[in-house]
Amino acid sequence: ENLQDEKIDTVVLVGMQTNVCVQGTTKDALKHGFNVIILKEATAAVDEATHTSTLKALAEKGTTVMSVEDVLVRLP
């Protein structure tokens, strides 16, 4: 089974190397029609400038970048 079989339409991403692993997973998820939320404090890159610019670029491609606090507030 996969996420789509389970009627999951949104993925929330965390992890290291915003500009490598997180970016790659985001692009793949978007390509497969998922909504993507990246938790900005739960991701990181080798430096803050790379992290920030990658998050900005991914947001411009349709990804939602949120804080952990904002996601927790929205949970039912």
Image (spheres, rainbow, N blue to C red):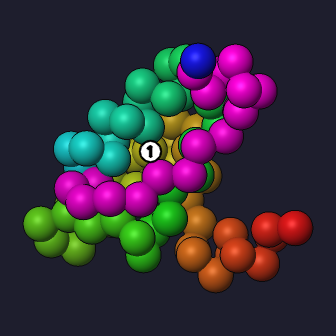
Q: How many marks?
A: 1
**Residue 28 on image: x %, y %:** 42, 25
Q: Is residue 12 magenta?
A: yes
Q: What amino acid type should be assigned to the residue bearing mark 1?
A: Leu
Task: Say which of 66 and 73 sits in front.
Answer: 73
Q: Is residue 5 magenta?
A: yes
The quadrant where residue 26 appears = top left
Residue 44 visible in image: yes
Figure check: 70 above or below 22:
below
Q: Is residue 12 left or right of residue 43?
A: right
Magenta region, residue range: 2-18
**Residue 57 on image: x %, y %:** 40, 46
Q: Residue at x 57, y 75 (%)?
A: 68
Quadrant location of the C terminus in the rendered image? bottom right
Task: Say which of 32 and 63 sits in front.
Answer: 32
Q: Is residue 22 left or right of residue 72?
A: left
Q: Residues within 10 Å of mark 1 (few under 14, many from 20)?
A: many
Q: Residue at x 61, y 27 (%)?
A: 3
Residue that numbered label 1 is attached to: 58
The quadrant where residue 1 appears = top right
Q: Residue at x 28, y 55 (%)?
A: 18
Residue 51 visible in image: no
**Residue 56 on image: x %, y %:** 43, 55
Figure check: 5 above or below 41:
above
Hey, which residue is sitting farthest right in the picture? Answer: 76
Q: Is residue 30 left or right of residue 45?
A: right
Disc 1 secondary structure class: helix
Q: Residue at x 33, y 42 (%)?
A: 23
Hey, which residue is sitting farthest front in the picture? Answer: 1
